[in-house]
Image: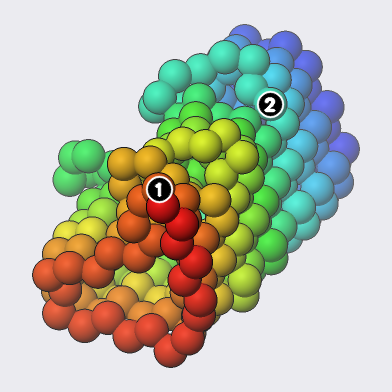
Amino acid sequence: NTFGNLTLTNTVGNAINLLNSTGLNSFLDNVTISGATVDGIFAQGISGIAKFQNPVTINSRNGVGVNLQNNSGVVQFLDSLTLGTPNSGGVNDPGINFQGSSGQAIFKDINVKGSFGSGINIGGPVAADQNTGKFQALGFTTISQATRQSILLFNDASNVQFNGISITERGDRGIEVTNHSGTANFGGLTTIQNENGVGNAALLVQNSTGTIQFNNVSAFDTQGGEPGAWIHDNTGVDSFKSLSVQSTGTTAVEITRNSTVNISGGNVNATN
């Protein structure tokens, strides 16, 4: 199937449904979605290829922006993906959702503005949510105003790749990696701000058996109950080329009960 320029407004249900497709679905031009009553793009059971070749913009969603579930094939965004402020939603409505998949989700630049759930969710609380495939953000990722974690890897086994991240105005943890048995590579520069003054960690890695790698992480204005960067109870390998944390009234970096943590450089600035 081949599609040209698409503008979808106030659709009832999901704006784009890609279900159990074994072939090629190619979106050749811009895709603009506004006001879908549920998800912007829903792809489930794909064993073929779904390819978006030009910018995709999803505004005023009432569910998940891009919802990828139980796919063994490839869903690919060759140009930018922009998710505007949602109209409504709940804690189970992230900007991007990747669950139960052995295939690949490939993105270029990602921009998520506002989410009632996590900005990007990978994995989930039940076994069927676990991915064994790949999630790749090959461009730059920007997430602002996420109510829950800006990026969450939870109970997952996938190969995850980011290549530069900016997190601002977070409502919860910036990046959380919990019980991850796959690999996760956060390349480029990752910056995590705290304009809202929340007490949750900017970065949390816990209970993971996989290999979690960060290139250059800078967390600013961490404060409150949790440490700014909190790495604990991991039996895999956690590594940082550079980890810099600025904190006020809380521990800047706490590392406890891990098998292997490598930090090559960085700066810690803690103020009582």
Check disc 1: other Cα within 10 Å, few if <14, some if 14-19, many if 20+: some
Q: Nearer the viewer, residue 66 or 48?
A: 66
Q: Mark 2 and mark 1 in contact (Cβ < 8 Å)?
A: no
Badge 2 marks a residue whose secondary structure is loop
Whether residue 236 sits left or right of residue 271 in the image: it is left
Q: Is residue 247 visible in this depiction of the protein?
A: yes
Q: Which mark is residue 249?
A: 1
User: The disc labelled 2 sits on which kind of residue?
Assistant: Thr
Seen from the viewer's position, the closer of residues 9 and 121 is 121
Q: Which amino acid does label 1 sit on?
A: Gly
* Vertical relation: 240 (above or below) 48: below
The residue carrying mark 2 is 85
Residue 78: % across, % down: 73, 60
The answer to whether residue 46 is seen in the rendering is no
Q: Indicate left or right for 185 with 158 as reference.
A: right
The reply, left or right, for residue 125 in relation to residue 247 is left
Q: Which residue is drawn at 20% across and 63% down?
A: 232
Crowding near the residue tagged with mark 2, few <14, some 14–19, many ≥20 C-alpha atoms within 10 Å: many
Q: Nearer the viewer, mark 1 or mark 2?
A: 1
Q: Residue at x 59, y 50 (%)?
A: 193
Of mark 1 and mark 2, the one earlier in the sequence is: 2
Q: Which of 44 and 270 is in front in this view?
A: 270
- The x and y percentages for residue 87 are 64, 15
Colour pattern of the rendering: rainbow
Q: Which residue is drawn at 77% across and 17% down?
A: 9
